[in-house]
Image (tube, helix red, strand yellow):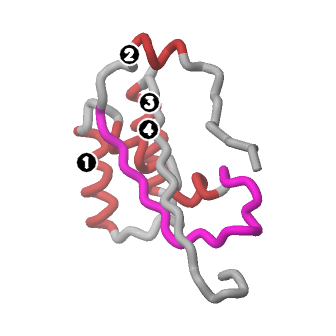
Amino acid sequence: MSDESGTERYLRLTVELTVEVQDIGALQTAALKEINHPDTDLDDDERREQAEMVSADETGATALQWLIEPDHVIGLIEHIDEVEPREAVLGVEPTDAPSDEDDDDHDHSHGHGHGH
C-alpha cells in the first residue's frame, strides 16, 4: 500500500529488550515443545539439530529465539491499517545485566512528539 503520489516509504523499527532468564530449564523445555510441534516446518534432521542447539545453549538465547515470533512484534504497531509490514527479523544474544541507569527508566516513555 502506498500513498497517492506512488512513493513508497519504509521505516525500520528497532526494539531492544533485555530479559532476565529465571528458569533456563523451563525456557528450554518450552522451546523444545515448539521445535517438536507438528506444525513446525522442519524435517527430522532439522528438528534434531535445533533441539541439540537449544539444549547446548546455557544462555537460553537459542531457546528464546524459538519462542518469540517476529510477526508478533508487528502486532505492537498502533494503527496497523496504515502500514503494511514487509519484513520481520529477530536476533537474540546474551548480554550483561542491565545497568542501574536502565533500571531507573521505567516510565516506558515512547518519545512520541505530538507538536504540529
Residue lying farthest to the front in this orientation:
116
Q: Position of residue 107 (x, y in %)?
A: 65, 22
Res. 99 mark: 2
Q: Position of residue 81 (x, y in %)?
A: 76, 68
- In the image, which residues are magenta? 76-94
Q: Give amino acid for label 1.
A: Glu
| Residue under label 3 | 18
Mark 2 vs mark 4: in front: 2
The residue drawn where x is 39% and y is 20% is: 98
Give the main secondary structure of the magenta stretch.
loop
| Residue under label 4 | 29
Q: Nearer the viewer, residue 56 or 19?
A: 19
Q: Is residue 79 above or below residue 108?
A: below
Is mark 4 in CB contact (under 8 Å) with mark 3?
no
> How far is mark 2 from mark 3, CA to CA?
11 Å
Residue 48 lies in quadrant: bottom left
Could you tell whether 14 is left or right of 8 in the image? left
The disc, 4 or 3, on the residue closer to the chain's N-terminal end is: 3
Q: Is residue 10 above or below residue 26?
A: below
Q: Give amino acid for label 3.
A: Thr
Q: Secondary structure at mark 3?
A: loop
Q: Position of residue 1 (x, y in %)?
A: 67, 82
Mark 2: few, some, or many residues within 10 Å (few <14, many ≥20)? few
| Residue under label 1 | 52
Q: Nearer the viewer, residue 15 or 40?
A: 15
Mark 3: few, some, or many residues within 10 Å (few <14, many ≥20)? few
> How far is mark 1 from mark 2, CA to CA?
32 Å
Is mark 2 in CB contact (under 8 Å) with mark 4?
no
